[in-house]
Image (spheres, helix red, strand yellow):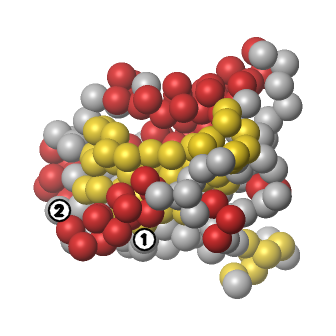
Amino acid sequence: MVRFAERFKIESSRLAGWNYSGKGIYFITICTRYQNNFFGKIMDGKMIYKVAGEICVNCINEISKHFPDVRLIESVVMPNHVHILFHVETHDRASLQDNRKITLINLGHKNHPDYYSRLSKKSNQVVPNVIKQLKSSVKRKCNQQKLYFVWQDRYYDEVIKDNKRLNTIKYYIKNNIKNWQKDKLYRA
């Protein structure tokens, strides 16, 4: 772990050098804080949604309305986490010219001439913005309903690189409710 300003800094789990605005299929998992079962419970092989779960399902289904180049492939809202599989079909010329790669520079050094413009480019990438908007929409709508709800700070992502992995992830998402008690995120 790298130390920064006398504090520990958590390393990014993002794929180093990958442009998250580039065309591709992305598998995202977002957990609730402390993996609390905010979204509902599973009974008899079916997800029984609480209000927060219904809000989350609706927000996921609206992603393509807010991001026209993002096509939802598969998703599931579990009691304490969400899996989303989507395809970014970007028409961003800069992304296509980059061939989905970002030149790595030392972003940790503020004296680098491209430090702030590079941070801005990374923070405006499609995938992080989809997740940021989803998380904030669910939180805002829960607040409007006076529901206590908190997301975990980070999220897991995987860039799907072949059809075999794509089919495995689709199968996993479709059967996640059935296999809930075997899931590593299972909380009674």
- Going by the image, does 182 lie left or right of 118? right
Which residue does the numbered mark 1 point to in the structure image? 15
Find residue 148 and report its horizontal and vertical position in percent: 85, 31
Can I make out residue 59 in this image? yes
* Rendered image: mark on residue 99: 2
The quadrant of the picture occupied by the N terminus is bottom right
**Mark 1 or mark 2: which is in front?**
1
Q: CA distance from mark 1 to mark 2?
A: 15 Å
Q: Is residue 42 above or below residue 176?
A: above
- Going by the image, does 32 lie left or right of 76? right
Identify which residue is drawn at 34% across, 69% down. 168
Find residue 186 and report its horizontal and vertical position in percent: 72, 63
Identify which residue is drawn at 83% across, 73% down. 7
Quarter of the view holding residue 53:
top right
- Going by the image, does 181 lie left or right of 119? right
Q: Is residue 119 above or below residue 103?
A: above
Quarter of the view holding residue 179:
bottom right
Find residue 100 and report its horizontal and vertical position in percent: 24, 61
Identify which residue is drawn at 78% across, 16% down. 145
Circle 1: residue type: Leu
Q: Nearer the viewer, residue 85 or 108?
A: 85
